[in-house]
Amino acid sequence: MVKKWFLILVSLTLFVEVTGQQSRLQEAFSQSYKLESAADYKNAVSVLSQVYEENNYYLNLRLGWLSYLAGDQTHAVAYYKKAIKLMPLSIEARLGIAYPLSVLGNWDQIINYYLEILKIDPNHSLTNYRLGSIYYNRGKYDKARVYLEKVVNLYPFDYDSLLLLAWTKLNLGQYGEARALFQTVLLNRPNDESALSGLSKIK
Amino acid sequence: MKPDVPKWVIPAFRFPGKWLVLCFFLLYALTLKAQQEKLDYRTTDSLTLKYYLTGEWDSLIRVGKASGLDYYWLNARMGYAWYAKGKYGRALRYFKKALINNDADPFSLEFYAYSSMSLGFSEQTSAAIGSIIQSNPERLYPLSPYPQSGAGGGFLQSTASSVLNPSEIDKEKNIYGEAALPGSGPYFYGYGSLALSPKLIITPGFSYLKTHNPFRAAKADTLLFSADNNYHETNLHLTMTWVPRLCWTVQSHLRLSGMNYEFSTVSYNPAHNSFSLATNKRKITDYAGGLKLTHYFGDLVISTDASWHSEYDSSFTQAGINLYYYPFSDSRLIYGAGLYATFHNNNAGIAVNQSLSLNLLKNLWLTGAFTLGNIEHKSFADGWITYNADFKISRTTSLSILFNLNQSISASVQWTNLKCKGQRIYYSTFTDTMFQDFAYHKNSLSLSIYWKW
């Protein structure tokens, strides 16, 4: 009988502890959102740090984002890396790590994370677009074209992808296709300066 | 009354006033440690950016080292700080780290190239330039960020030997000679480059070589004659380098040489069964000109060149194409292959060369060169034709050390050792096939001074 009561007591204690920890986490997350909206990123980080658990994916992900906003890029990268380790198929963590890495200028690492995303989801439009724009800025128009064409096929009337693909084609000397793309951009945004400037280079 | 101070206390601190000094140092050390602990990303980034903009290189390096961080902009700024201080080896190390984070940034690539150029690592320079082209095909660069002049000198020591038909040699009947060509002696050189525009550089220069060539002729291991030949060579050079686009380099060169030398010949008089030695003196004026085009395709470099050379009694034209592979990701390896064609008045030849260079240590390169075949065709007025085919293997080892005396003056000491062994096969419509073993060995030690202005 004593044994039974003892087990009930232990279970209750554990239940209270778990729910207590859960409510502490909820409270900390809630407070961090309030502080984030008030642009107090440092305190938002410190609130979550008080309930930090190394094996908690959500905490690592959120701390990665807040550390990035707080300007602590090295910690942001570390938190996002932990999140990726905990959830190896996470696309959001890989998209997130790109922010601090871009501030640090570590673009080759960003490309690697984006390529990992495309292994998980080859049609991920945002990643295809971003890879396309990185390669465009590096002057590797052939590579940029591959990713941007994929986005334009998935979203044929998306302004940003159409415009970037049009400039890519222009740089590749594919003037006919570039002209058609610039004209499609003008259907989306009539009188768009960039598209008009591109068309003037073809004429 | 004097306080009772324990014996273990350091004598200097047996008086209370000295404890204040100790406390001050402790406080200073703690403050310094606290300052170091404050070097997080934001502090490091803002401080190094500030120092970079104000040109406070020592402070930038101190902060960068203390932070222990590793990201693109920090490495790029650290690299530039070392570059500005004239420490190109350290600059190279940081630019390399920066390029691991972002291999397409033209800033680090450009200064990686300049640092390599300053250290005399032409292969790494080419590799970096190749990568700049990949990422920025339209970008135009000057050849070098500054005009440069240099002067130097050294000592050359070489030996050469050749033996005809080694398997059939009959030393009782044959005379054989050994000559060290070009011999041993000192040399000097100087040049000064002038940038006429960011894309056009003109470089006049001169060089002088004076060597001493011992000559010996023997029969059946008995020394018959020996002579001391002397050689003087003065060269005037003019090179113009034009870089219309970064991926293209056009180089034209002119050379005017004056050579003054003594040479010895052995002649055999069958009537008296005797040998005689004649030493002659000769003055030669030689000139040459050529054009070289180099195109960079990332890790691949293709160069074509054509040149015309006068000789004291004939002239020849040479044209060739060379292909080099400089992998930027592993700049310790270079592979090169080339094809050369030579045309004389009555002579034409073709050579296929291959070379492989490995960077064993920081400044130590090992180069192996292998000539697959150097086939020459000669026709003579009396109707007979000869073909020569050379097969040779050579190995070059060089060690160079660079000293930066200050920001604009640097000096280098370089030792180069070359060993070559080969065999020439003669086929002639007039005589039988003959074999000739040849070998040469060259050592050179030079000291150079460079001045950037």
Image: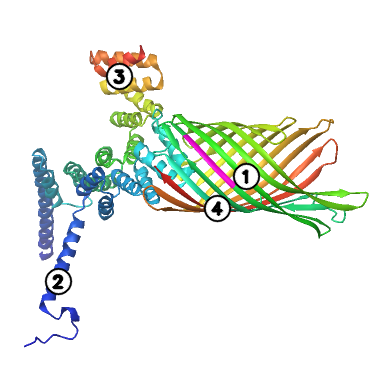
The one of B83 and A120 positioned closer to us in this rendering: B83
Q: Amino acid at mark 2?
A: Val
Quarter of the figure with the C terminus of chain B: top left
Residue located farthest toward the right when viewing the structure as drawn: B271
Residue in the image at 29% along x and 23% along y: A161
Q: Are marks 4 and 2 on the same chain?
A: yes
Question: In the figure, is residue B421 to the left or right of B89?
Answer: right
The one of A170 and A177 positioned closer to us in this rendering: A170
Q: Which mark is residue B233?
A: 1
Q: Amino acid at mark 4?
A: Gly
Q: Amino acid at mark 1?
A: Glu
Q: Are marks 1 and 4 on the same chain?
A: yes
Label 4 neighbourhood size at 10 Å, few (<14), some (14-19), many (20+)?
some
Report if the CB atoms under discs 2 and 1 are less than 8 Å apart.
Answer: no
Q: Which mark is residue A166?
A: none
Question: In the figure, is residue B268 to the left or right of B215?
Answer: right
Question: In the figure, is residue B285 to the left or right of A198?
Answer: right
Report if the CB atoms under discs 1 and 4 are less than 8 Å apart.
Answer: no
Cα–Cα span, label 2 and label 1: 70 Å
Cα–Cα span, label 2 and label 3: 76 Å
Q: Which mark is residue A156?
A: 3
Label 2, secondary structure: give it. Answer: helix
- Mark 4 vs mark 2: which is more N-terminal? 2
Cα–Cα span, label 4 and label 2: 57 Å
Q: Which mark is residue B154?
A: 4
Residue in the image at 30% along x and 45% along y: B77
Quarter of the figure with the N terminus of chain B: bottom left
Dot 3: chain letter: A
The one of B193 and B363 positioned closer to us in this rendering: B193
Residue at label 2? B21
Label 4, secondary structure: give it. Answer: strand
Q: Would you say residue B167 is visible in this rendering?
A: no
